[in-house]
Image: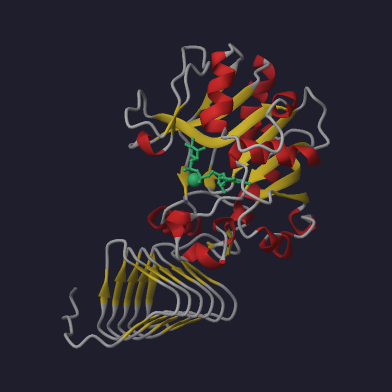
Amino acid sequence: MMESSLPALEAILLVGGQGTRLRPLTLGTPKPLLPTAGVPFLAHQLARARSFGVRRIVFATSYKASMFEPVFGDGAAFGLSIEYMTEETPLGTGGAIRNAAEALTSAPSDPVLILNGDILSGHDIGLQVREHLSRDAAVTLHLTEVDDPSRFGCVPTDDEGRVTAFLEKTPHPVTNRINAGCYVFTRSVIDRIPRGEVVSVERETFPGLIESGELVLGYADRTYWLDVGTPAAFVRGSSDLVLGRLGSPALPGPPGEFLALDGASVSPEAKVHGGSAVGSGVVVEAGAVVSGSVLCDGSVVRSGATVADSVIGVGARVCSGAVVRDAVIGDGAVVGPGNELRAGIRLWPGVELPECAVRYSSDV
Ligand code: GDD
Ligand code: MG
């Protein structure tokens, strides 16, 4: 990936969304800071961006804005220089980009990278920027293909890669090709977004540029791509990173079946696999089975419990014989012995489910 890195590129990272689909995890922690394969989610995006030549990043914050700087500081630990620009009230994606651009040093004709703050992507950012520069585009959008494009920005292109329409969350998508949430903007195009107003790049800026005949380019590829905005996608993203399905310079250890941070206690008689991430202070007792899951710091999985494709919040407990599958257990919550939680269920922080009187057989 290094061969297509570029000199000292600037970027804006959009991290002001509320992450509503990830509640209750995002009640206390903004989505970009959720522990993912052992580190805050953004660490993966920052490390990749840096590997492609990004040296300065402006964080566009709003929701829980004050929580970012204590984690990332001035960026030196990541080999970056990080600035923070906060919207008092959320300005939408376009308004956020315009607001953050006040902190850019780029000249009007320079390319500026814009990243949605909830994307894992294996694409070559350097190639995307080169394509943008060589075609002298106003904006170049990374595009990927998904099975259900109605949940994303649907982006048809012509044979030369020119974007012909931008259809945000349309019930009638015309192609499976979607906006992958990583843009190269020519700086002067950002400066034309109205300042201090609520603007959506997806619903206003992109359609407006296309309408007025400017070159909006698609950079399509089929590398690893995931928006971690739902609980199911979030746990998949973390386990894919742990398993090494997407390489990340920020992974705190070698890829493998699971990753345990310092201070975690995993019994040799427990089965922990499928890319599970085990936080510090976590206890996994003998006979427990944990697969494809995120166990946040200080959580406990007791003997004989099963946790699959789930997030167990900070300090939460899954008691003996309980089954937690495709679920989110909020911080400090307790799943009493014998309970079975499945299929997208979410337990709010601090909720304690008492022991379940009816015990299930061990083959559930
Ligand atoms: N600063 C700031 N202010 N950031 C915001 C705001 C805001 O008002 N609103 C959203 N964001 C940030 C979010 O934090 C996230 O990083 C990014 O903008 C996109 O918001 P999401 O809420 O994750 O949008 P989405 O996933 O439904 O759709 C977007 O991403 C898809 C790809 O994952 C759109 O860009 C789609 O077109 C795209 O396909
Ligand atoms: Mg998203």
Between 215 and 205, the residue placed more toward the observer is 205
Q: Residue at x 51, y 12 (%)?
A: 160
Res. 357 image quadrant: bottom left
Between 337 and 302, the residue placed more toward the observer is 337
Q: Residue 87: percent from the left, percent from the top? A: 68, 48
Between 137 and 92, the residue placed more toward the observer is 92
Q: Residue 187: percent from the left, percent from the top? A: 74, 27
Type of colouring: secondary structure
Q: Residue at x 79, y 24 (%)?
A: 108
Q: Residue at x 78, y 50 (%)?
A: 83
Q: Quadrant of the N terminus?
A: top right
Q: Is residue 183 left or right of residue 22?
A: right
Between 74 and 247, the residue placed more toward the observer is 74
- Against 141, residue 51 (above or below) is below
Q: Is residue 309 left or right of residue 51?
A: left
- Against 60, residue 187 (above or below) is above
Q: Residue 269: percent from the left, percent from the top? A: 37, 83
